Amino acid sequence: MSRTMVAGNWKMNTSPAEGARLIQEVMEKVGTPATRVVFGVPALQLMQAQELVAGHTNYAIAAQNMHQETSGAYTGEISAGMLSEVGIEYVILGHSERRDYAGEDDDLINLKIQRALEAGLRPIYCCGEKLDIREAGNQELVVGKQVEQALYSLDPEQIEKIVIAYEPVWAIGTGRTASKEQAQDMHAYIRRMIANQFGADVAQNLTILYGGSVKPNNAVELFSQPDVDGGLVGGASLDAENFAAIVNAIGG
Ligand code: 13P
């Protein structure tokens, strides 16, 4: 099975009408993709987006968040079960914006991952260091700790459902991308960690995406790295032409 995937994280962008158009345009431009293509849409658009991709090979929808409890008095929240009931396949968890703006830490993210897996969702787990950490050369220490805290309590069957997205915070929305060497080094490090904890086979099949200013003009060189299996794309996923070009940058 191919490890490759290109996922868009639209964040809090697009109206429902714009979102529907964007999905339709990408699907028209790409046709049947050689890789998994995932649209991470705002909560309000999840059902509409799911209907648009249903039955189309290699397309799927991701939620951008969910709550760690299964139900209850949590005003404004959405549960994993609600997402899976309407056919959503993926959920982005641990994004640096939620760590920063919603105070999410790896213990909470671990709970969300457990809940997502119980409901049959596939978490796209985001990790990544901030600029000061990178400048001090401590990125493996910090990302290693994130991966350990969020994922090591899972069992091997569960880890097979996880997609990891390495997103250096200094590269998100800044136009500054990790070099292909920086991306490859960290992806290889994460894969080694997973191999040590869960075994070589699990690590070999694991999808590890790179995120942070992925654009049509850098996607090919990033995706050609042996441990970079695709991208989690923010800004460039909001433009059908750019996103289609990034999808087509994957060899298949
Ligand atoms: P940009 O592609 O806009 O840098 O965003 C990356 C990101 O945060 C994807 O989750």
Image: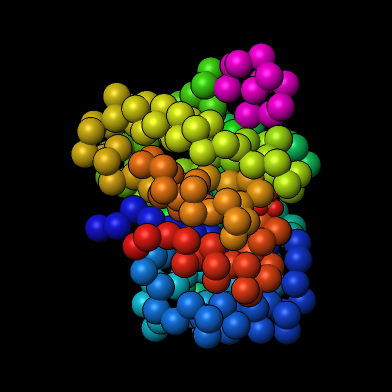
Judge from the rendering whether residue 98 lies leftward or rightward of residue 124; answer left or right: right
Residue 117 shows up from this direction: no
Q: Residue 9 in the image: x percent, y percent?
A: 62, 59
Q: Nearer the viewer, residue 250 or 190?
A: 250
Check the picture and name the quadrant holding the N terminus: bottom left
153 versus 218 height, above or below = above
Residue 179 in view (yes/no): yes
Q: Position of residue 152 (x, y in %)?
A: 40, 29
Question: In the image, which residues are magenta?
Answer: 129-139
Which residue is drawn at the image coordinates 66% and 61% (left, top)? 236
For the point 54% across and 62% down, the residue is 246
In the rendered image, which quarter is residue 237 located in? bottom right
Residue at point 73%, 84% (across, down): 17
The vertical placement of 60 against 110, above or below, is: below
Q: Specify whether 105 is left or right of 189.
A: right
Determine whether, in the image, residue 78 is placed left or right of residue 7.
Answer: right
132 inside magenta stretch = yes
Disc tally is 0
Where residue 35 sits: x, y (%)? 39, 65
- In x, y percent, where is residue 138? 59, 16
Image quadrant where residue 46 sits? bottom right
Query: Which quadrant, please, contains the C terminus?
Result: bottom left
Q: Is residue 147 above or below residue 208?
A: above
